[in-house]
Structure formats: C-alpha cells, structure tokens
Amino acid sequence: MPRLILMKEELATRYDPKAFEQRIYAMWEAKGYFTPDSDPDRPKFSIVIPPPNITGRLHIGHALVNTLQDIIVRWKRMSGFNTLWLPGTDHAGIATQMLVDRELARQGISRFDLGREKFVERVWEWKEKYGGEIIEQLKRLGASADWSRSRFTLDEGLSRAVRYVFVKLYEDGLIYRGIAMVNWCPNCRTAISDVEVEFRERDAKLYHIDYPIEASGLGPRASVEMRGPLRLTVATTRPETMLGDTGLAVHPDDERYKELIGRSVTLPIANRSIPVVGDAILVDPAFGTGVVKVTPAHDKNDYEAGMRNGLPQLQVIDESGRMTEAAGPEFAGLDRFEARKLVLQKLEQGGFLSSVKPYHHSVGVHGKCDTDIEPMISRQWFVKIEPLAKPSIDAVRDGTIQIIPETWESTYFNWMENIHDWTISRQLWWGHRIPAFYCANDHITVAMDQPARCPQCGSNEIRQETDVLDTWFSSALWPFSTMGWPDETPDYRTFYPTDVLITGFDILFFWVARMIMMGLRFTGKAPFSQVFLNGLVRDEHGDKMSKTKGNVIDPLDVIDEVGADALRFTLAIFASGRDIPLGKSRIQGYSAFVNKIWNAARFAMMHIDIELRDAPQIDSDKLRSVERWILSRLNDTTTSVNKSLSAFRFDEASHAIYQFFWHEFCDWYIEMAKPVLLGKHGTSDDLKQARRVLLEVLDRSLRLLHPFMPFVTEEIWQKLSGVEPSIMTAPYPIAEQILEDPEAERLISAVRSMITTVRNARAERGFTPKDRFRLYVRGNDPRESNFFSAYAYLLMDLARLTEVVVDRDPPAGTQQDVVEGFHIAIEFPERVITKEQIERTQREIEKTRNEIVSTEARLGNEQFVNNAPPAVVEGSRARLLELKQRLEKLQQ
RNA sequence: GCGGGGUUAGCUCAGCGGUAGAGCAUCUCGCUUACACCGAGGGGGUCGGGGGUUCGAAUCCCUCACCCCGCACCA
C-alpha cells in the first residue's frame, strides 16, 4: 500500500480554473520538473515536438497533438522514466517570408527595396518579437516540455547539421543540381516540391481550337474529322499556353491522323508553323479528339514529349505568371489569366475556336497561398530519393518502426514506393542558404563553409548559391539535430533515438517519412520506434473547421472559459486515431466532470481527519466488503488505463477513468460510505477504515487523472500534504494484485442491482421515493446471508426501505425477483391512487400530443414524402398510447 | 483509375464471434448538508441493403448502394 496524504487546507467552494492554472504552471517551471535528470539508472523516455511554425498561433490542431504528447509524457514521467520532451519551433520558410512581406507591404515597401540581407534581418527581428508566442500558448495548455532545451530550426547548431547533411548527400551523389520541370508558384516565385501541391476540384471550360493544316504536300483527305479547310482540333483548358506550342501530337497508329505525321500546321494567332509528331505515350487516341497540343515549356507531359520528339521549348510565361516577349508583342507583360481572355478573343475572331464546353477537373495549387501552380523549366537542387526511401520502407515493414493506427502503413508504402525526387531548392531569402559555392568560372564547390578560393581553378571570386532549402529539409533532421548531432553530445547519447512521434497524419509525407529517411541514413537508427498519427479536429457534425463556416474553436478561448483540463480531457476522450468531432457543448460536458472531481475532493477532504497522520497502512483483511470493492474496481481501472495508454488509446484510457470516478466512486462508493462517514452506522474502526479508503481512492484517482488533467489534480494535491511535493513527481498507479477482490465485486454488485431493482419497481408502480417497503433477501450460503445482514442498513438507506429481511420467506403474493443469482422479494403496500397522479398523467398526455404536432411541423412534409415518419414521432406516439392506458387504469 | 476508411439510439461515436453500449439530447421524479456543471429512473436501435459461413454475426466472407480521405490522371 502506498503513501499517505493528509489534509492541509480546504478547497475553494467553487471550481475556478482561472484561479490556479497559471500559478501552478509557473510553479512547475520554477521547480524544474520538466527537465529530465541525469540519473543513468532510470530508463529514458524521449519524444520531440512537431515544431510549430514561428508564425503559428495555437489552433485546435496544436491543442490536440500537444495534449496527446503531454499525456504520454506525464504518464511516462510518473511511471519512473527519465523523460525528455524536447520542444522548439520551425522557421517555416515560405510562411514566414510571406508574413513579413505583407508587413512590409503595409509600410509601402517590398523586400526588394530592402535587399536580401536587410530583409533577413527584419525577419529575425520579427521572430524575436512574435516567434515565441506559440510557446507561451502551449504553456497555457499545460505542456510539460523541457523549455530549457528549446530549439529553432535556424539555430546555429541545427544549421550546422543541415549543412553537414547537405554536403554528405552531395558527396554521396544523392543531391544533384539540374534543369527540370518543377512545380512553380508564380505568387511566391519559387519552386516547390510535389507534396506541397494540392489539388482543387474546379469547374472550368474546355476549349477546342482548330489548327489549320498547311497546304504544302496536301494529300488525300485524312479523316472525316476534317472539313472545309483541313484542320486539326485540340482541346485545352489553358488556351494561353498555345502561344508556347511547338508541335501537335497524334498517336502513331491512329488511322485518322497517322498520315499527317511529319506535316505542319499553322499555330493560330502566332502564325507560326509547327510540326505534327507521333507520340504513343502522350496521346491516347480514344480520348478527346486524339490530337494533343504540345507545349514543352509549360506542361510536364509535354515537356517529356518534347524531349522525345525534338520539339523546342518556348517559354511564354515567366516566373511571376506573366507572358514573356516570346508570347508575342500584344501579350508580353500580360498576366496569364488576362492573356487567356485575349487569346480566346483572338481565336474567336479568327474563327479558330470551334467549341467551348463546361469541364470539371482538378487544378494543382500551392497549398500555402492557393495560387495555381505553373509548371516551369528551371535549374534546381534535388535529392535522389530512391536510395533513401528503400531502407525507410523496410524499417516499417520489419517493425523497426510501428505506425499507429496501422491502416496508415499502406498509405506510407504506397507513397514511398512511387516517390519522385525531392526538389529542395527554394527561391526565397528566409531559410538555410544552400552551401554550394560558385567561382568566376562557375565551378561548383559544396562545402560546410565558404572556400577561400575555387579548388578547381583557384579563383578567389566566390559567391554562394542564392537559393535556400525547403523548410522540411531541416525538419527532417529534427530528432537528432536538436540533440546536438553531428556531435556525440550527452543528450544525443542519452535520448536518441526517441521513443515515439505523435503528429497529425497530414504531415506523414512532408515530415515523418523524411525524418525516417534522414535518421536511418545519418544515425543508422530509426529516429523513433512508434509513430502515432492523430486525426483531424472537426466540428461536432464532422465538418472541417474553417473561418468561412464560422465553426472554428479557438483553444485559447476555451481555456479562458472552462480551463485547460476540460479541453484536454475532451480532446483525449475523442482521440482514437480517427478524426475528432469537437463542439463547445462537448467541452462543456466534460468540464462538468472536472467540476465533479473538484467536488468529490472537497467531500473527501471534509471527512479526512488530520489524525489520520498516524493511521495505519491499509490492511485489506480488516476492510469491509464495500471498501474492498471500490479498491478492486479502482485497481481494475488502473490496469485498463495503463494498458490503453500503451496502445495510444487515449479514448479508452480517459473513458475508463471517467466511468470509474463518476459512476462508481462518486455515484456509488461515496453514497455507500456516507452512513459510516457521517457516524450513522458502524464502529469507530469502520469509520477509520472508510476515511482511509476514501483518501486512498482520491489519491490514486488523482494520480491516474493527472496526465489528462494536470492542473486540477495538482491544485487538489497541493491542498493535501503528502510525501511528494507535487503530483508530477508522484508515481503513476500500477495495478496491485492484493487489491483484486472478485468476491467483494460480486456481492457489492448484487447490492447495487437490488437497489436499482427496488427503485425501478417503485417508479413503475407509480410510487414516490417517499413510499417505503420491506425487502426480502435470501443468501445462497451462511456467509452470504451474513453479508446481506451486515449491509441491510445500506439497502435500507439507498433503496429507501423500512426493513430488510434476510433468509425468511416473503408473504404470499409479494413480487419476487432474481437479481444476480439472489432471490429477493419486494413487499409493496396497497397502492393509493391520488387525484394528483391522475392529473399528472393527463398533463403528460397533453404535452406528448403537442410534442408530436410540433415535431411534425418542424420536420416539414419533405421527410414524409417517401419515408415513414421518423422514429421520434413514432416514439412519442407509442408513449401517448401508453399514457392513455395508464390513465384508464388509474381511473378505474 | 489505385489504395484506405466509414454506414450502430435524435446527434457524435465505441464495440469487431456469444443476451445491443457511452456521451450529449429527450421525458419523468427529486433543490437528500461534495456537486443542480447534481442525483434517481424511463423512452428510443430488426447495428446501410442482399446473400453466405457458424450452434450463434453489429462483429468473419461475398455482393450492392451511398459517404469521406489519400494518391494518380486530367488534351
């Protein structure tokens, strides 16, 4: 049996989280409870935070992922592990640059006015000022991360790790620089990687454009498709790109067109002559007209087709999305969407636009700014990904890394097995500048530091690559770069690899997969052995939260209103790995539970006497059944909480405690203990034991609850004087076999059922709680009979009985029942029907009638057109019938 | 097109081979000295449709329908 805690002072009469949450957090921090010690004897547990962007403000997704981490961290810490939760923030390249850009715009300047160096300075200033906000918000949530170890992805140490990795990968031939077609964001004016492209469904138009076939060498009519002046018709959703067409393609086996291969058509508007080529890969003869325009500079497939067929690349759109000189004088300088209108107008005028049809398709946009992606040929840096992906696939397949819920593994494999090279260069200013250096003769040197002179030609005119790295490049190193790697620091030795990663499934590809790749490659170890992917927080109807829908829940508002504990508990109880439907009313519901805990503690503390200081340890042989029962139930709860937490079943764990604390401890045990606690029943030893057990259950429950509700449990703990100065340093309960007592559970459960049966019977027969009866109970053996005699007082008290008669035959005609294997009989008196009862029933009938009418009106007719009336109405009708029958009986 | 998930009480979900569960909502009764952010009790479901395996299926298999989410394609 564990330690003793004693009452020190009373709890405030009202639960008011505002009164203590921030005070308690400050105390924890001041005492250094979040910092792991250097005890080499204890097993370690470590976890790194998914670093929030410095631009971030705590939203409900952060609240969820950090609550879940904190639950695990507090649980492990209390369970005796030397626990490190390593926090930090991400520099968030594009997001931050965009934000500071916007701030500059408000001052009427652009980053180009400042120049790169000054701009980056400004971003640092911004970071110093606002970049820590989210950290403060995480503290409000109760996050017990070791802030003394907080890291930032642009820290000197982390930057060194980034350069080290870049150089190493380059030397190993896994980073290369080359010209390729990449996803380009004309708004951010940078290349982005494949995963940053999001597809949006859109209603658009499909334009059919006629390309006249040139007369030279005119052969026989090739197809019925061609009428009048011979032409080839192509379909496109982006007519402005036709200005960059350098060919048309048909399938080489297509009977309609194959004779045209090698001939030329005239590109409308531009009046250029372009060839017809045959390409079996690009063209599906069964799709559309079977003719495809080829724009090698502005479409990925066309780019490849152009290479295959020797078609030139003609860039007609520039990096800001405007038409180039090559598009022709009337288009040059026009925005691509403006150009589209003008092109259409010209096509129309020239009679080249044969049809316009509505078309539904998806368009790639840049996830960060919603701008349509413009495929663009440019020189970028890439990571050759396959050699990194292979071992990462194996690590998950062979169980080195476990993904939870398991269903995500197939998504992971699917992506990893079809992965493309990673575009890592960004044309931004904010980020890790690529450690590549060019000399006057354009020789490339990739090195940790800028070389004094070119190793190839000796030139001392050295300039660094202007591009920076994708922000996810540095995040990919997070689990080890934050611990001092590539140095073998004490932290790295002690805490790497980490144990578990908890994050949202939305960054499985962006982050998780890449950490696995980099971790395996550079440390030779999987950076974590388990990954728990949490779902998305949605509104209470399962819809995505969005500002436009107005269904966004701000965690900071919630914390202000009901406290962090209620928010945390609500998030936990819904967190099974699937999406979480969250509504304010739900949070309110669980804040009632926090209140319940508060009040139960108040009750307990009213009855825990200071003289308990010298109370003996609990001796289960001396305990009464009811005490043994609640301890056994608590023990069972302890088992399932620990088991559920091990499996990241936050929902099961929190539900188990909720169920135990409210519906067993509060609803039953406290009520059952009251006669003894209030001195109405039992010996003074009974009283001592009851007090002792009350304290024991409160103590263990608080510790069990602490990871979920750190604040309220600590506040209550602080009002008790115990062995531990803080609940944070108290041990997490584990199941103890000595507390198991199936016999007590069986008997007390029977008592509960008997009480419920009597209550039911009373209500069914229309008696009020004031009416009292006699109950007959029969034990199956002398021991059980003794038990029921001993607990007769409880049955009488809670079931409101005049007498409990054990082992005697009830009078004839008494209602008999079998409850959990025990024969009981309730002796009801003659029922007295009052006028009141009749009137009440009549009122109810009236009410139910109105209910049916109003429900039907509310639902309207549409519900009834094809369907039966809804269950609500049917239920009410059934009830109406029932009431009418009851009334008839009463009136007889 | 490929892959994954879902369809269980009015709502949101858990259960995933053995007598239908929770929270919220609803109805009735009760301000009993921890708590009305409460207590006691009730009503409400042929577990999406169909077929199969089994002594037994919400739970396993097949099939259909609808919904959601990835990925790919998109002339």
Image: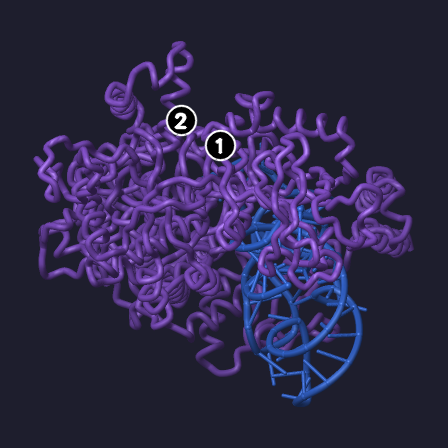
Chain colours: A purple, B blue
**Quadrant, the N terminus of chain A:** bottom left
Residue found at x 71% / y 71%:
A814
Q: Is residue A859 visible?
A: yes
Tell me the crowding category of disc 1: few under 14, some 14 to 19, or many 20 or more residues within 10 angstroms, Cα based.
few
Please report whichever mark, 1 or 2, sits nearer to the chain's N-terminal start. Answer: 2
Label 1 – label 2 distance at C-alpha: 9 Å
Q: Which residue is at the front of the view, A484 or A355?
A: A355
- Which numbered marker is on residue A517? none
Q: Which residue position holds label 2?
A: A98
Q: Is residue A592 visible?
A: no
Q: Which residue is at the front of the view, A381 or A78?
A: A381
The reply to whether label 1 and label 2 mark residues of one chain is: yes
Give amino acid for label 2.
Answer: Met
Q: Which residue position holds label 1?
A: A369
Vertical order, A608 against B6 (above or below):
above
Give amino acid for label 1.
Answer: Cys
Vertical order, A712 against A819 (above or below):
above
Find residue B69 and report its horizontal and vertical position in percent: 56, 51
Find residue A484 and report its horizontal and vertical position in percent: 14, 47
Q: Are marks 1 and 2 in contact (CB under 8 Å)?
A: yes
Q: Quadrant of residue A127?
A: top left
Vertical order, A336 against A237 (above or below):
above
Find residue A65 and report its horizontal and vertical position in percent: 39, 46
Asked if residue A45 lies left or right of residue A391, the reply is left
* Subunit that carries the residue with mark 2: A
**Quadrant, the C terminus of chain A:** bottom right
Q: Which residue is at the front of the view, A458 or A376?
A: A458
